[in-house]
Image: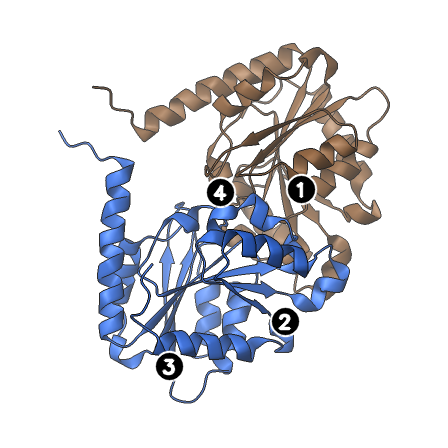
Chain colours: A blue, B brown
Amino acid sequence: MKIVAAKSILRANDQLAEENRRALDAAGVLCVNLVGSPGAGKTTLLEVLFARLPDGVRPAVIEGDIAGVIDAERMQRIGVPVVQINTEGACHLDANMIAAALGQFDLATIDLLVVENVGNLVCTAGFDIGERVRLLALSTAEGDDKAVKYPAIFQGSDALVITKCDLQPMMNFDRARIRQDLARLNPQAEVFEVAALRGEGIDPLVAWLLDRRGARGSRGR
Amino acid sequence: MKIVAAKSILRANDQLAEENRRALDAAGVLCVNLVGSPGAGKTTLLEVLFARLPDGVRPAVIEGDIAGVIDAERMQRIGVPVVQINTEGACHLDANMIAAALGQFDLATIDLLVVENVGNLVCTAGFDIGERVRLLALSTAEGDDKAVKYPAIFQGSDALVITKCDLQPMMNFDRARIRQDLARLNPQAEVFEVAALRGEGIDPLVAWLLDRRGARGSRGR
């Protein structure tokens, strides 16, 4: 009889994530794990961000959802190669799912691969998928208390993207408060403030990402 | 050696949930499991809803969070008895946690017990905690595509409360679309549209809840 313990599942995931990372590095692909709550504006951020990429930087996307293909269709509409993963109940993507999805791409034709994870501020924090950059999207509509309530994901992300900043005047959202809480949990994290539908704040994020691409290999997870 | 399978954990949870439900019924307490994404406006909804309860209906709250006591402090500020559960990483409450929290209350002094679950549109769907009513909060800021992406929680809830309806003009949110998707997944579900900070749409929700209280026992989960 075989007994599979949670710890060994996580260890197997970490090994597979390391293999994904090596394959992506070898192909010159920067892999970004985009996490955040349902409705944080992850897909809209990608639509706008991809339009701002310099010529020659070729994006691709893996969409993670419990069900449906809504976000994958949005990516197809803007001409970005996309693979949809339906987790059928699972609350996060894992390295095994990503390994399978990578087989659907020709990595030689991709420079920036964004994995849009399942909308979940808890479970996605625990699983390395082989990314070089973990990007956390948080909308001003979600409130400025989220770092205190969901510390792990704020601790484990390389940058926080505050989305829907154009809505801030209508929200009880104090950017200084979330920046303070993040600085306490994760002093190295970058912070970007964007209003994607207005195209505001996107360029610094693009520049930072491309910088990470240059620095590829200098940082594992 | 003991091996605990996921299925038996769920079975144990269901049994414990049934015991919670019996204890709550016996004490005349209507228990509501309030679920939704981080930032859906669950706590604000409760603050406003409790202020609209008729005289003689005594509320209490169990707050579920990964960490922190922010929401419990908000309940204390409005004079509502509250027990905070910190899950320390777990992505949802379960019947065992609720059983422990119930021991902290004098049920004879409570008519309406709302359990504000961890902000999570996935994991909370799978766990009965012993409630009579499951209430799903979804804000207009989250987008109208959420029923397609997170079907289980829409299927398993008794009512959908669309929150932040005052913000709808600024959002890409089509109420007809979410109502259609919900009707397909869960035709029995009620729908309420509220703007809690403006006090709009609260009274029909209060009336419906009090009705459930009268109908207590007619419906298990």
Query: Residue B152: which numbered mark, if any?
Result: 4
Q: Secondary structure at mark 3?
A: loop
Q: Amino acid at mark 3?
A: Arg
Q: Determine whether A144 is above or below A211 in the image.
A: above
Residue displayed at 50% across by 58% down: A187
- Name the residue nearer the viewer: A10 or A74: A10
Q: Residue A99: x percent and y percent?
A: 25, 60
Q: Residue B113: x percent and y percent?
A: 67, 24
Q: Determine whether B208 is above or below B170 in the image.
A: above
Q: Chain of mark 3?
A: A
| CA–CA distance in space, label 2 to label 1 | 25 Å
Q: Chain of mark 2?
A: A
Q: Are marks 4 and 3 on the same chain?
A: no
Between circles 4 and 1, the one closer to the viewer is 1
Furthest-bottom residue in view? Answer: A55
Q: Amino acid at mark 2?
A: Ala
Furthest-right residue in view? Answer: B55
Q: Residue B29: x percent and y percent?
A: 68, 18
Relative to A42, B63 lies left or right: right
Q: Secondary structure at mark 1?
A: helix
Q: Quadrant of the N terminus of chain B?
A: top left
Query: Residue B42: which numbered mark, if any?
Result: 1
Q: For the residues labelled 1 and 3, say whether their Cβ atoms are less than 8 Å apart.
A: no
Q: For the residues labelled 2 and 1, say whether their Cβ atoms are less than 8 Å apart.
A: no
| CA–CA distance in space, label 3 to label 2 | 23 Å
Q: Amino acid at mark 4?
A: Ala
Q: Pointer 3: what residue?
A: A58
